[in-house]
Image: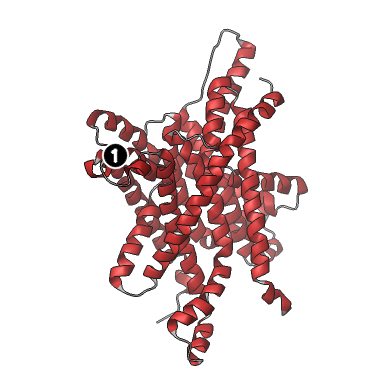
Amino acid sequence: MIFEFGLIFGSIPKMLTGLGLTLQLLLLSSFIGLVLAVITLLMRISGRWFLVAPAVVYIYIFRGTPILVQIFVIYYGLPQFEFIREGVFWPFLREPFWCCILALSLNAGAYVSEILRGGVLGVDKGAQEAASALGISKTQSFIYITTPIAIRLSLPAYSNDIISMTKATALASTVTLLDMTGVARTIVAQTFAPYEIFISAAIIYMVIAWMVQKGFGMLERRMSRYIKATR
Amino acid sequence: MVILRLFAVSLIIAVIIGLIGAAMKLSGNRLAQTIANAYTVIFRGTPELLVLLIVYFGAAVTLTAIVQSFDANVKFIDIPPFWAGAFAIALIVGAYMTETFRGAFLGVDSGHVEAARALGLSNFQTFVYVRIPQMWRLALPNFGNHMLSLMKDTALISVIGVEEIVFVAEMATTVTNKPFTMYIVVAFIYLCITTVITLAVMLLEKYANKHLVGGK
């Protein structure tokens, strides 16, 4: 058993075609997930039971089940029903790509809304009291005072979530999508050289995770520069 | 049942790896620190599925090569997918546990460790009698989260052909032609197990912090 470096260099261009799909999955589903998360968060902190209850149930279900099972339920499971196969969304739900996007976004929505809630709860009460003392309305104080502080507080956890989303996109290969892991698996099936191919794929994932971490680190430093200035 | 067995086995391995990793990170030894750091960076940045595939197929290729050097007639050998899965999941969760345990060990008051030293306890005794009883309380909330992600990672091993519930659901689908029902049942089973884990961790936390509750 020899470690063949030629194989690594030969397979990297193929793997990079999969990288495009991985990044598409990551960017689209984290964007949709963020929108879902904000909606869920607003429902959760609204204080009205008919809004809070669905949000809590949604978060509980999607955080309590494996993403793989969610992908399978959506991709293999939904076509069981007649009304879905005849519905308007069928052109989307037929495609494994959109099924993955749906599963990953729903998942991200549940996790991120918890992160954001942590951020909102972490905002100093005094800031809100000061706002209401100044006669700022509840909505305004949420938008102009709570939100900026909450975003900064939840950034570190959010960057961790983006990294785990990156790792979750690898699951797309289980529903026949040729993302980076999918491409790596087909190459391994042909060459049977698991170490070379899978490790080079792993290195690309690690580079993505590293860039996400650095990028968010820079953003966080920029957003909390007013704290450093006082020291 | 397979997933519960897998959960138990890989949880034990992960805790051992986590303790060793944390001890390496906190030791003064430069080499040990570098190894532990590389380990956590690698296994926290790689998708779980990829680690699983590397461990399973990598072990098969390595074992085959080793055996072939003794006996050239052997075509192919693989390790049981259950153990490959348990080991791969334990490696991933072990990396997260390392970080959690490191933070928890740092949270133990250094005065207690110094007191243990002053009383003449050995390094190992300090570790077992002073550090561990105090750190597990601090590690508990994160530990619970890692247990949940470990539980959810067990669904992945159907990919390498272990007959656990996702695999069985696939089989059942080919017979009944009702994929949604089958996978929803799987999801519900996972939901029940994760709920039990969450509740257990909550109870443990209550137990661990009861000395902090003031008299009423």
Left/right of residue A179 with respect to residue A41 in the rendered view: right
- Label 1 Cα crowd, 10 Å radius (few <14 / some 14-19 / many 20+): some
Front-most of residues A200 and A29: A29
Residue drawn 44% across and 52% down?
Answer: A105
Front-most of residues A81 and A44: A81
Task: Give percent across and percent down for residue A166.
Answer: 54, 47
Position above or below: A139 against A197: below
Question: Which residue lies most toward the right here?
Answer: B30
Report which quarter residue A92 is drawn in.
top left
Question: Can residue B110 be seen here?
Answer: no
Which chain is disc 1 placed on? Answer: A
Residue drawn 27% across and 44% down?
Answer: A84
The residue tagged with tag 1: helix, strand or loop?
A: helix
Left/right of residue A153 with respect to residue B149 in the rendered view: right
Residue designated by label 1:
A79
Residue drawn 47% across and 40% down?
Answer: A171
Q: Quadrant of the C terminus of chain A?
A: bottom right
Task: Give percent across and percent down for residue B45.
Answer: 60, 46
Task: Give percent across and percent down for residue A22.
Answer: 54, 42
Residue drawn 35% across and 43% down?
Answer: A74
Question: Which residue lies most toward the top here?
Answer: B73
Task: Give percent across and percent down for residue A167.
Answer: 53, 45
Report which quarter residue B205 is drawn in.
bottom left
Question: Can residue B210 be seen here?
Answer: yes
Left/right of residue B48 with respect to residue A201 in the rendered view: left
Front-most of residues B90 and A117: A117
Give the amino acid type for the residue marked by disc 1 in the picture: Pro
Position above or below: A128 against B175: below
